[in-house]
Amino acid sequence: MSEAPFKFGFWSDKEYHLDRMNLAGLTRAYFQYYAIAAYIAVALLSGGYVIWAVAQGQADVVRTGAAIVATVLIYPVVWYVLHRYILHSRWMWKSRLTASTWKRIHYDHHSDPNNLKVLFGALYTTLPTVMIATMPIGYALAGTVGAVAALCTGVITTCVYEYVHCIQHLGYLPKWAWVREMKKFHMAHHFHNENGNYGITNLWWDKMLGTFYVGAADRPKSATVFNLGYDEEVAKVYPFVAKLTPGWPHIANPVHRKRQMANQAPAE
């Protein structure tokens, strides 16, 4: 699995599992993660530039505001499309060029859903995606300042999405009703059937496009919920992900896998 390029504070060689963490521990870990620190830095720099440009009269407030609003509105659409058609695609494992990226950004997360180290999106894929998804819209509405404002909005929204995503995997009952609901539907996506409930902070597009489901009574249990279809038969033809996965072939169900590892561990 891919790790941060440097390690400090919380992010050591230890394993951290959200089902055994509390909210305070998660929050400390969240703000120490290198990708989150990078997003915050980008938000501060880009936001500072936008404020300066508006104060200097170099940007139209209404058009810049429109760029910000448009970014907030388009973000759930972008996430839905990426999650459904890219992260849950079955073409990325077929090429040596994309297999390692797919493994890092989604296979590892579904294979071990509560492992905090593989929950966050990779900086090298997420930040360019945010730029591509937001800056052209901002530029079309308000020029260069609009593009930068859209980028700032995009990285802040990404931080919110990542935090909510962490909470959904946390061994914790959220106090806000909408977060509890999202957690329930997201856990169904990870532990019952991955072919639905693609939203992270809302399920509007799932409901619009027919991929929303309430729970186990609505859909049969998926045999590929933990491996996303990448099994031993697929690995015979496309071995790239398998070669990058320690202990391959392994039990797909992470609970059963950890139980087996515990049983095989030598007694102290």
Image (spheres, grey):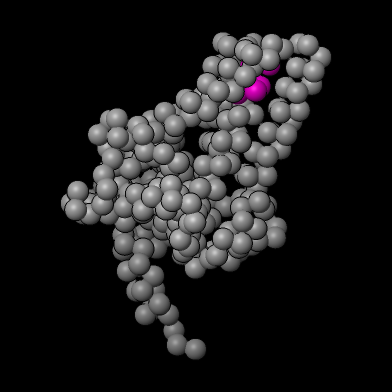
Q: Is residue 93 above or below residue 188?
A: above
Which residue in the rendered view is the most extreme toward the right? Answer: 56
Residue 71 position in % (x across, y down): 54, 24
50 and 229: which is toward the camera: 50
Q: Is residue 131 above or below residue 164?
A: above
Residue 245 appearing in the image: no
**Magenta highlight: main SS:** helix
From the viewer's perspective, is 93 left or right of 266? left
Tell me which segment is drawn in magenta.
Answer: 145-150
Residue in the picture at 69% in, 11% down? 60
Residue in the picture at 65% in, 23% down? 149
Residue in the picture at 34% in, 49% down? 185
From the viewer's perspective, is 80 left or right of 138? left
108 and 116: which is toward the camera: 116
Q: What number of labels is visible?
A: 0
Confirm whether the magenta stretch covers residue 146. Answer: yes
Residue 213 position in % (x across, y down): 26, 44
Residue 257 position in % (x across, y down): 35, 67
Residue 201 appearing in the image: yes
Residue in the picture at 44% in, 32% down? 76
Residue 250 position in % (x across, y down): 33, 62
Q: Is residue 83 above or below residue 188?
A: above
Confirm whether the magenta stretch covers residue 112. Answer: no
